[in-house]
Each structure stands twice: as C-alpha cells, then as structure tokens.
Amino acid sequence: MTACDDCLRRAQLLRILAPRIAELSTPRARGARMLLALPDIELVYTVAGSRAAEVQAQLEAFDPRAMREEVVRAHLAATCRHDAAYPERLLQLPDPPAALFMRGDPALLTGVSEEPAVAIVGARRASTYALEVAQELGRGLAVSGVTVVSGLALGVDGAAHRGALSGNGRALAVLGSGADVPYPRSHRELYARVARTGLILSELPPGAGARRWAFPARNRIMAALAEMVVVVEAREASGTLITAEFAAGLQCQVGAVPGRITSAGTAGSNRLLVDGAKPILGVGDVLDALYGVGARPEPPPLRVALDPIGRAVLDAVEAGDSPLDACVHPVKDVRAALGRLEVLGLVRRDGLGGYERTGLRCEPA
Amino acid sequence: MLASMATFAIEGVDSREVTVEVDVRQGLPVFNVVGLPDAAVREARERVRAALLNSELEFPQKRITANLAPADVRKAGPSFDLALAGALLAASDQIPTNELGRCALVGELSLSGALRPVRGAVAMAAGARAAGFERLIVPVENALEASLVGGIEVQGVPDLRSLVELVNGRWTPEPVTEMSAVDAEPVRSLDFCDVRGQSDAKRALEIAAAGGHNVLMVGPPGSGKTMLARRLPGILPPPSFDEALEITRIHSVAGIASGSLIRQRPFRAPHHTISPSGLIGGGSIPRPGEITLAHRGVLFLDELAEFSRVALEALRQPLEGGGVEITRGQRSLSLPAAAMLVGACNPCPCGKPRDNCACDQVARTRYQQRLSGPLLDRIDLICQLEPARPGELISADALERSAAIRERVVAAREGQRARLDGTTATCNAEMDAPLTRVHVRMSARVRARMLEGHATTGMSARGHDRVLRLARTIADLDGRDSVRASDVDEALSYRMSSAWRAAA
Ligand SMILES: Nc1ncnc2c1ncn2[C@@H]1O[C@H](COP(=O)(O)OP(=O)(O)OP(=O)(O)O)[C@@H](O)[C@H]1O
Ligand SMILES: [Mg+2]
C-alpha cells in the first residue's frame, strides 16, 4: 500500500491552505466542498489569492520522501486513488480524496468493496435515548459482520463506535483531523481502542489539527464508504444532515431513527423520514435494507483447534445447558475453556453470569 | 493540692493520651469536671464519690476541680473513672503522688469500687506504649488483651482498694497468664461437604479465600448462596499474630472482643437495611463500621441488590484503598478496612431459574442497575449457582471437606506471604499496580493471551490488573510460580461481563 507523489503533494497543499480554507468557508461549509473539487492549480489560485505564487513555490519545494517518512514516524500508513488498496466506492465522489492516511487494520478499508459498511451519524449533544440506540445499532451491526463507520465525535458517533467494539466488530472512524490526532481529546481512549482493532482514516496529512471545514469534508467520505447512512438524531440544519445529503447523491441509502415530534433535537431526523428516508426501528431494519428483507449474511466460520474440553463446553453452551453443570470435567478446566471461548468470540455472557452461544460458527483448523 | 494522672481516650481504632488534673482546695464542697466531657464523663463524679466512700477511702469535703486535657478532644464514656479517682486520691494525699508518674490508668468504676472492663484496651495499651509509658493499670478483665501489645507492663486491678494497696506496695497483681492456643482452630460445625453440587461456586470461593479476592455469587433463591458464604470462614487461612492483634484491637474498641487474642478472621454479615455510616463507620464520635469490623476477614452482603445504593457507593473507596477516612469537624480519622467482600444476589427480580424466568429485559436492567457499577468493577470473581439437582441432593457420595480445601488455601497464602514479605500487601488481592507488575510475570504466550482478552472484552486498566492478580492466585493454588495461559483464561471467565457492567 503506497501513495503516489502527486497525491501526497495534494495532501501537502491541503495542509498549507487549511487556515485559508477555514476563512473562506461559509458557516455551513458548503464552500469547502466546492473548493476540494478543484484541481491543485485552481485551488491554489482560488484560496491563496495574492499569495498564490508563494504557495506555488512552497509546493514545488515539496519532498514526497519527507512526507513518507513523516507518515511512518506518525505510525500511519498511506494510500491514494491510484493505489489498489484505495476503495472504489470513494471514486463515485465528484471530489474523491487524493491521499488517505490511516492507523489500524487496512483490511477494513479494502473490505468495504466486498462487505457492506454502514455509517451511523447524529448529534454530538444527543439524548440518552439516541446514545442507547446508536450503541445498540453499532453492536448489532458489528455482530452481523457489518463495518460500522462513524466520525469519533462526541455523542452519537462515539456511542456507535463503542457499540461496534463491544460487539467485537469492525469499527471505522473517519476523522476531520490528521489520522494520528485523536479528536475530540476526551475520546483519546476510544480512539486507541478503534485504532487497535479497527481503523482510523483521514484525508488530512499527519499532525493536521481539527478545523471546522474539515468535518463536512470528512462526512462526504463516510457517506461514500457506506452502503447506508443511518441518522440517529439530528436537529434541522445540522452537520449530520449534510452527511445525509451527500448520501442521497451517491449509491447510498439513507435511514433515520424516529424521534419525538415535539423535540427540536430530532426535528432534522424526523424531517428525513418525511422526505422518504427508511425508518430504522432496530438493527433488523438496517440488515433488511442491506441484504433484502429477512436475508442475513452468514459470518465466516472461525478456524480454530479446540481441545476436547473446549469442544464439550462449546457443545453444552450450544445445547443451552449450563456448562459448569453439564460437563464432567474439573471446574477449573471448564472455567478456563469458557474464558478462552469468550475471548475467541464463540460464546458470550448474557449479563447474569450465564453463557450463551454467539452466531459465530467454528470449524477445525 | 494538685495532682495529675495519664489515661487514654479512644479515637477511631487508635487512642490518644489524655491527662486528668485534679485540684483540691478549701472551699464549698463542689466537684466540677471541665474539658469537653460528655454525659458519661460528667457522671463520673457520682461514680467516683460512691466508689471512694464504699472502698473506705476518704472523699474530701472541699472544692474539687477536674480538668481533662487537651480540652479540644471530645471525651466520651466511663473509661476515665479510674484515672480521675487516682488523681483525686493523689491530690488528697491518700496515695503517694510520684508512684504513678510513669503509669497510665484506664477503667470504669462501679459504685461499689469494683472496676468494670472498658472498650478498646488493646488500642489504649498500644497508645500508652507509643507515648513512652512503662506501666498500664487496667481492670483485671482487660489485662489479658492489653498485654497482647507487648513492650509495656500491664497490671490488672479488680477494684479501687487494690489500686491503693498496689501503689502503697502492699499488694501485687498476679502476672497476666499467657493464653492457650485452643481457640486457633476454626468453628468446625459448618462444612463445605454439606453443600451438594455448586462446584463452580466452591471453586470461586476457594480462589477468593486463597488470594483475598472479592466475590459475588449469583443464583436463584434456595440454591445455597447463604449456605456457602457461611462456610467460608472454615476455609480461610488463620490470621498471623499481627493480623490477629489488629482484629482484636478493632473488636475491643467495638466492645465485641472476647478479652483474649482473636484467632479467627471476622465474618460480618450486616442486614441489607444497614445505613451507610453503619457500613463504613461514622457518627458524632466516630465508631468503626461493619467494613472495619470485617478487617482481615470477610464482609458478607447477602441480597446485595437490596442494600441502599448510597450504602454500596460508600463502600467503593474503602474497598479500593483498604481503609476508611472519616472527617468530623476539623479532625479526620482513618480506620482500617482490608476486608474481603462476598456478595450474593439473585440473577433477576423474580429470582426464578433461567428457564422459567418471567422478567423482561427492562426489569432485569433496572434490577442490575441497583448494584452500583463501580462496586461491581471491584468484584474479582462472579460465579453462578444453578439450583442443586435432585440427584445431587439425594446422592450419598462424600464430598470434599472444608479441612482439605483449607489446606490448599493455607499453602497458597504461605507462598504469597513469602513473596510479598516486606511490602504492605499480605495477599494477592492487596497488590497494587507496581507489585502486580513485578509478581505476575508472564511469558510471551500468556502476554498474547491477555492482549487477545483486551481486544475482545474491552476491559479497563483496573480490570486488567484484577485479571492478573486472579491468575496469580490460581497459579498459587496449583503450587506454580509461573502464570500459565490457562490461568489467564480461567481468571477471564470469572470477570464481570462487560454487558452487565455497562448496564449498571
Ligand atoms: N446445594 C445445596 N446443597 C444442600 N442443601 C442445599 C443446597 N442449596 C440449598 N440447600 C438447602 O436450602 C436451604 C436454603 O439455602 P440458602 O439459604 O443457602 O439459599 P440462598 O441461595 O441463599 O437463597 P436466597 O436467594 O433465597 O437467599 C439451605 O439451608 C439448605 O438446607
Ligand atoms: Mg440467601
């Protein structure tokens, strides 16, 4: 996985121009989108104005090798639109990001071409209800093998990521800052968890701080990656709705979770429903939209060599018996087997200390 | 004439020196006590007067002023009587003054002049020794426990008359007899072999006892939770001498000591209606709570979900730090509270076995929310009980006896003692983060196992250390120095499920 010189230069240009773009962008930052669609030269002239020559000179002095080293130092990887690892879905954008920087498991990025990804988005200041829904949707989708995309923001975004992580699933966060810059800072721990098992993605070069215009820009990436955008809770005229707007212009479905009709906090998401978005009353509705009503994908079986005790314990859980009761083996061995099976994702606890089987199949390695 | 005498006041589970000054001079016969005395201390005047007269001693018909210094410490209870009487006797020339200079006096007087035992004699003896006194005179019933502290001569006196004889060198008390070791063995009546089935809970309790870990038993009514918990003391290792002394000292302050060294770990099982201050201690004159009374032993909270949330929240800090901090006015006190928490509760409000449980998700969640999340995070083992099957109940098979389990527990603890020698921890559960790093050494394979566990269970840093400490204990029970991957697996399976923690 590599990024070519030209695309890295484009990233460098974004870095140079970032403060100016911020000044030029309208409050709702639609301006930034038009800007990002411009080729390098035009972008320089539109944004830098009288300082265009200066910027041009800076750009000519750009050393792609230095940026590659910078990427490595920041523990990131880079790809670009001329690279095989670049997801095709992003090319449907009128302004696809040139280079992408990431930390985590790059298979999540290539995976979006084969298996569906769903973006869960919503307000930062969300109701408890919305947080619960987002977390449950994130978990349910992750358990069903769907990649959960969100923006790591406070509120709904964070809840969706947490849900995906708790379901041992694939969590993909697209940032409005550099991929090595946890933003918001209070989500540092969440950032680390996503980076450990999922993927953090950004079109901005390493070290880029968060800027207002960058958020609608990253929303376009979320919408393009996802097969469906689910709006959990949004006010009218909010950033979340921009994502839904992008989605409507792409091969991406839009769903919304119904909210109280008397609350301003849910006016935007309810409006989407009126305009024809799919009502989402649960994980099932999302899965129906992705795979067809009632159809579900089969998760790939886990290939693992279980010892006889592990096998027996798994069978007991599968049969609905308490393994500690049903197995003739010493408790310590049954307990060790349970711990192992849970870590492998084959069983899970139902909250009362009891165990139940997950949907994951298991085949001998 | 003026005379003073040293005595000790209980403060938490420690004691503080108090000086009793008595001034006797010509004037109208009155007897005043100043220096923040409570009602019991003020009543000491009456007890001292009657005790003196009934002991054929003289009560001076003069102006008597007694002062308890320092004046800013609240003085409570009747334990100052003896020092007050002694100072009065010295001030009225009935006993030589210099004789009691290096000596402290503690004791309650009855009207007849006989001495009654006081609470907290162990703490007072420790305080007197620390303050440099050579001799402590106590009621004869307190002599044994006071002498446990060592390093100070303890004399037990039956009544006021004997005190006078003692000071005049006409009588010496019998030396305090060394206590016999008969009470070292735990109560034998409750044995694990009475509990049929429940092998998971038995194993969990064995691990908990071996490492001092907190444990929660979850199971339907009548499955044997209370029964198992009551048998836990029978498999706990005996306390070391220092621990036994700590226990005796606390129980002596609370007035529940036997008068000699307590050689069993305490098992406290407060009712679920207990108040927060009853649980962690408090009151205007701070008294130790149940968690302190359970120090070095077990605090058993049966029907955990029925305890008030405030009370459970109050337990969080003591469970983490092994101590309670109480602030009253300008003074703050710390009470020891290194107890092992054992909880029991039903899995859901209806309490029926899983197959015919009628509770919906909302009811379950609400029930689980009653247990405070951070408290659950401090539980190392959660185990499950299913109702014992008829076959198991009827079976005549002999089950393992407590004595056999205890042997393994004692062996495991001995290993920990040796390993943790010279640190503040006495068992695995008390290891802090740095000690855990040092003593739970992991091979690359085990480390990989922990990483995997992190990835799939999303445990907190606290959870991580708890799993390591638990794995350490599991290896100790097996007599191994190295922690194996299977130990980590087993430890992981006893953790609270993250789903439950999130719900709470
Ligand atoms: N596993 C068992 N083996 C033998 N006797 C048992 C067992 N379980 C329960 N019993 C019998 O049932 C009685 C009730 O058990 P216990 O009080 O321990 O139940 P519990 O789990 O604490 O129930 P609750 O949730 O109602 O408090 C015991 O005193 C004992 O006689
Ligand atoms: Mg009970």
Image (cartoon, rainbow, N blue to C red):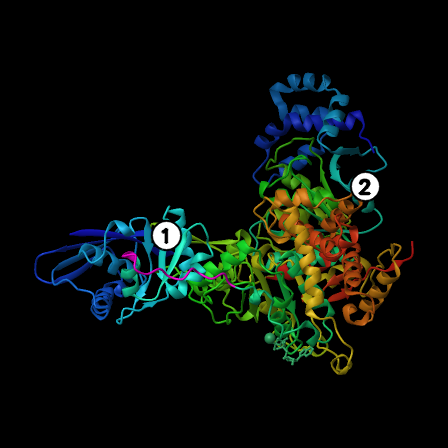
Q: Nearer the viewer, residue B499 or A314?
A: A314
Give the x, y percent position of residue B146. 42, 58
Residue occupied by mark 1: B135
Residue type marked 2:
Pro
Q: Which numbered tag is attached to residue A87? A: 2
Q: Quadrant of residue A278?
A: bottom right
CA–CA distance between discs 1 and 2?
Answer: 86 Å
Q: Residue at x 76, y 66 (%)?
A: A356
Residues in magenta, as a range: B167-179
State which chain disc 1 sits on.
Answer: B
Whether pointer 1 and pointer 2 mark residues with C-beta atoms closer than 8 Å, the reply is no
Residue A27 visible in the picture:
yes
Coordinates of residue B381 in the picture (x, y in percent): 66, 60
The percent coordinates of residue A130 (x first, y second) are 60, 57
| Residue nearest the observer in this picture, A258 or B246 | B246
B111 sits to left or right of A53: left
Magenta stretch: dominant secondary structure: loop
Local SS, label 2: loop
